[in-house]
Amino acid sequence: MNKRRDFLKLSGALALGTILKPGTLLADNLAKKPIGLQLYSLRAAMREDPQNTMRLVSSIGYKSLETANYADGKVYDMEPIFFKKYIEDLGMKLRSAHVGGPREYDPAKKEETLDWWKKAFADHKIMGAKYIIKPSMPIPTTLKELDIWCDYYNSIGEIAKKSGMKFGFHNHAREFEAIEGKIMMDYMIEHTDPKLVCYELDVYWSQKGGQDPVAYLERYAGRFPLLHIKDEEEIGASGTMDFDSIFKAAYKQGMKDYFVEVERYNFDPIESVQRSFAFLDSAPYVK
């Protein structure tokens, strides 16, 4: 992807008046559905010009956000208080944040590591987030190693609970592989405290990992307050994802928020994000 090219196209859209005010880019009914966006979908533009990019996101009609950037107490190089006011002025809210934390985990340095998470929760609480989601992890080779991670996640969940927030984990396809005969994702769900740890089901990666997302939602009902709605490219583009059944099962088991995530594109990223919004906005099964 050519970051400079994408930035110039975004800037051109702004200069031509594409952005008028939140809610003017699509149909009048666009604000009726709380459709969320994972900002990783516009990662190049968010690096180049995050404030104007979020103006465009708001104009499309997205109402809630999930961030994918946190460093040195800032999000997209913005202080928490500034970020909160900026997106709220655009008619959006931060519901969730992908926060990686320290890449490796050493139980001998547990308290030091948990101090890092305490800071992260404090900063995101200022921004109004309800969830912090760990987006990935190293894949253990034994269940004993995985037990250490489950204990770690429970400890982070304790910090979240004290902050009035929730901690969770987001899957890719590899978490559906077996470790010593046990599906990793199943083992994690079954060995973390449901009062402390939730999960954000990425429905696309679940299917790619050989697991029907609907069956998963039914099997572990109540553990998935958040979903990533994803497809091969734009939402609905491949025709291989049964979003009707997915949404029905997700609502039934207690979904609170869902976020569009586009990782590959048939169009410029901002158009792919807009098309994904339009697909969900017109879908009768999306509330």
Image (cartoon, grey):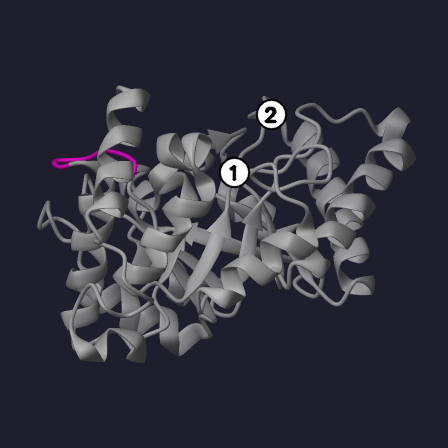
User: Which quarter of the image is occupied by the C terminus?
Assistant: bottom left
Q: Residue at x 46, y 36 (%)?
A: 175
Dot 1 or dot 2, earlier in sequence = 2
- Helix, strand or loop at disc 1? helix
Q: Position of residue 213 (x, y in %)?
A: 32, 55
56 above or below 249?
above
- Helix, strand or loop at disc 2? loop
- What main secondary structure does the magenta stretch of the protein show? loop
Residues under labels 1 and 2: Cα distance? 9 Å
104 above or below 126?
above
Q: Position of residue 147 (x, y in %)?
A: 71, 37
Q: What is the quadrant of residue 85 in the picture?
A: bottom right
Q: Which residues are magenta?
A: 263-267
Q: Which residue is mark 2?
A: 140
CB under 8 Å between discs 1 and 2: yes
Image-based side of 116 in relation to 64, left or right: right
Look at label 2 and name its amino acid.
Pro
Q: Which residue is mark 1?
A: 184
User: Which quarter of the image is occupied by the N terminus?
Assistant: top left
Q: Position of residue 30 (x, y in %)?
A: 24, 73
